Every structure is written in C-alpha cells, then in structure tokens.
Amino acid sequence: MLTELKAQPADKILQLIQMFKDDPRPVKIDLGVGVYKDATGLTPVMRAVKAAEKTLWETQTTKTYTGLAGDPAFATAMAGMILAGAVADDRIAAVATPGGTGAIRQALELVRMAAPQATVWLSNPTWPNHPSIIRYLGIPMREYRYFDAESGAVDFDGMMADLDAVKPGDVVLLHGCCHNPTGANLNMVEWAAVAALLNRRHAVPLVDLAYQGFGDGLEEDAAPTRLIARECPEVLIAASCSKNFGIYRERTGILMTIGDAGLRAVTQGNLAFLNRQNYSFPPDHGARLVTMILENAALTALWKSELEEVRLNMLTLRQALADALRAETGSDRFGFVGAHRGMFSRLGITADQVERLRVEHGIYMVGDSRLNIAGLNAQTVPVLAKAVAQVIR
Ligand code: PLP
Ligand code: TYF
C-alpha cells in the first residue's frame, strides 16, 4: 500500500524554518513563517495566558471529555469577542476546532455537504493552505483578483469585477483583517460594497479571521466581520486564537455559522457531526484558557494590554521599514509598507531578488516576497532596507 504514495510538495512557508536553521551564518534574519517575535526574537507566552494556566492547574479537577462542539462557554466568549452582538445569539452555531486551520477545514466540509456544486472563490494571492485544502476536498475553486502589485494596494475594481461572476450558493473566502500574504486590506466602504455584491449574487461569505488585534485594534479588526455578519443572511466565520493569544501549538480555533434562527439546531448538529467524524472532541486546553481570559475582567485587561503592545510594536517596525526603504532606495516605491496592516507585507520584488536576499544577505522571506514584520527589530530594519535597495538596483 505505502508503495503507492507519491511525495507531497512541501509547504513553502514551513520549509523556510528548516532552511533558516540550517544556515550556519552567524548573522541572518528570519522573516518567514508568520509567528510573532519580540525584539529579542522570542515568541513569548502571553502574561494572561500564563496566569490562566496557573489558575487552571490549581482549580481543574477533571480532564474528562467536554462536548463534541467543545465547551459552549468558549463559543459564547468567542462570539462576544468577534461579533459583539452584531447578530442575535440564536442565529449562531459554533464548534471549537483545532486551530483556525481546523475551522477552515470544517467550514469547507460543511460547504461540501450542504452545497456540493458550490464553487469556493479565493483571493489571488491567498494563504497557500486555502487552495491546498479545497483541492484536497475536491471542491471547485476559482480566484478573484485582489492585489495590485504596482501600487501595493487592493485591486478593488478587479476584485469586484471578478466577484460579479459568482453564482448563487457559491462561497467567497475573505480575510477578515490583515490579509495574508499581502498586508493590503479593504476599507469599510469597500467592505460594504462587497457585502452588497455577495447579497445581490446570493453568495455566502466565509471569513477567515486569524489576526484580530494585529492590525488596527481588536474592535477595528473585527469591524469588517461584524459588517458582513449584519448584512449577509448566511455567513461562515473561521477564527484562530493562535496569534492574538499566542497559543499557536495549543491548536485553538472556532467555526461559527450565522443563519436563520430556525436552522440553528440542525446546523449545530451538523457541526458536531463533522467534529465527530474528523477527531471527535476538539482540543480543550487552549479554548479553556481563552474562555478564562475573556470571562475575567482583570485577565481580559492584561491580555488586551499585551496584545496592544504586540500590535504597536509591529506598527512601529512597519513605519520604520517604510522610512528606511524610502531613504535607501530614494523612492516611494515601497511606501505601501506603511499603509499595510498585520504581520505581513508583500514587497513586490522578484523571486530572484528574494533569493539574492537569502544567499547574499542571509535574509529569509517567502518566495513571493512576503515578509513577517515581527521578524524585524530596530537593528535589522536598516539592514533589510539596505539589502533590498542593493538587490533591486
Ligand atoms: N488563516 C490564515 C490566513 C493564517 O495565516 C493562518 C495562520 O496561521 C490561519 C488561518 C490558521 O492558523 P492556525 O491553524 O495556526 O490557527
Ligand atoms: O502564513 C503563515 O506564515 C502562518 C503560519 O502550513 C503557517 O499562517 C504557515 C504555513 C502553514 C501553517 C501555518
């Protein structure tokens, strides 16, 4: 049997982790995988998470199974954080999932069950795991234009023109904030236009929310998702706690559906069914920490203040990089870096130039020229800017 297996292509982002480790040069800069790092290069456990873990250790008396959907308190806490009352509670069904990826996978399985003929539309570009999972599930897939490489901004006209071709029942995957890999995002007027177009076309939005709190703020970053939730009759939301709670390896995420209140019970049953088919009970530890933090005012305040530090640190680095690139290149070519939000920006330099950054300068970024802003610090910003100026010369 195993002789029948073919080698699978590696994940280009995760591959960089190993390449970076294997590079013997003492001076090198890792701007690859999207993990937050502080100025010393560490990905710390957040203070509120540590505090919740201590309390949990002291007070948890059992580790028996939760429920197939996870602890309902987690769903309530997450709905509060993401939707903040944008829709009535009785319209929301939800299951805890292993990370945001698990939520995306379960969302797509739900789509395949409910609408096997639906096409799922993806931004071009998008996170590579989106097309990978969709292809694996055998779901029809199409792309819509998203990024204008020239300006480094969203190609909104192109996006709207392409989405005009969606068919009733099609699913449109949208990055709720902090678009990965480009860093370019819609403004609220554009979001409203997208929601209206999806409604005209009777399409269903699937919002991937993996970076709430990493862009303009916790509330600001949820605003597009809340708008979509208010405006569209049916919405799928796949949210991750990996980044904003810094609990990457705990695998904490949630799939929420919004629909007619009369459909809630059957939808909830189908979500639980999907969990049972794929892994039975979802992981609990991370979800419980998140619930404890969001249910306790002091822990919430502690978490929010650290998340805000993280966000502002990235914003400062982003602005410093935009300034340094302007100074080193003597042009505004990379001005968009300052306007982008989240962990990433796509520089729009060629694959050869990205390769030269790695070979000649020990600077690692994804081949499409996506860089993780959090991989920088005050010392490495000018180093990167000089190197970029050199390779584009
Ligand atoms: N969606 C996007 C766009 C991401 O970048 C990520 C990455 O971490 C995820 C979803 C899901 O992450 P996780 O499964 O680690 O929660
Ligand atoms: O885009 C990123 O870098 C993050 C982390 O298979 C990631 O979303 C990358 C690849 C992957 C899983 C997570």
Image (cartoon, rainbow, N blue to C red):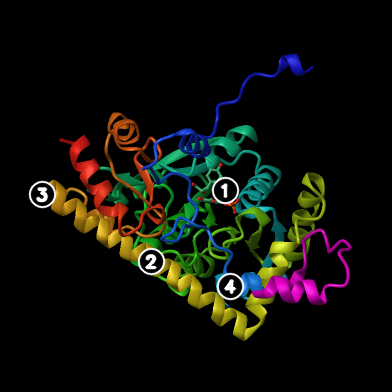
Confirm or deny contact between disc 3 and disc 1 (CB under 8 A): no
Q: Residue at x 59, y 61 (%)?
A: 241
Q: Which quarter of the picture shows residue 77?
A: bottom right
> Please, which residue is most extreme toward the top here?
3
**Alpha carbon distance from label 3 to label 1:** 49 Å
| Along the viewing direction, whichever of 123 and 149 lies nearer the viewer | 149
Mark with earlier residue (3, 2): 2
Confirm or deny contact between disc 1 and disc 4 (CB under 8 A): no
Q: Is mark 4 within 8 Å of ligand 1?
A: no
The residue pinned by badge 4 equals: 47
Vertical comparison of 262 with 358: above or below: below
Q: Amino acid at mark 4?
A: Arg
Mark with earlier residue (3, 1): 1
Mark with earlier residue (1, 4): 4
Mark with earlier residue (4, 3): 4
Is residue 19 a member of the stretch shown in magenta? no
Q: Which residues are magenta?
A: 51-73
Vertical comparison of 250 with 217: above or below: above
Confirm or deny contact between disc 3 and disc 2 (CB under 8 A): no
The residue pinned by badge 1 equals: 169
**Alpha carbon distance from label 3 to label 2:** 25 Å
Q: Residue at x 80, y 76 (%)?
A: 58
Q: Which mark is residue 313?
A: 2
**Alpha carbon distance from label 4 to label 3:** 42 Å
Mark with earlier residue (2, 4): 4
Mark 2 falls on what kind of element?
helix
| Along the viewing direction, whichever of 308 and 277 lies nearer the viewer | 308
**Alpha carbon distance from label 1 to label 4:** 43 Å
The residue pinned by badge 3 equals: 330
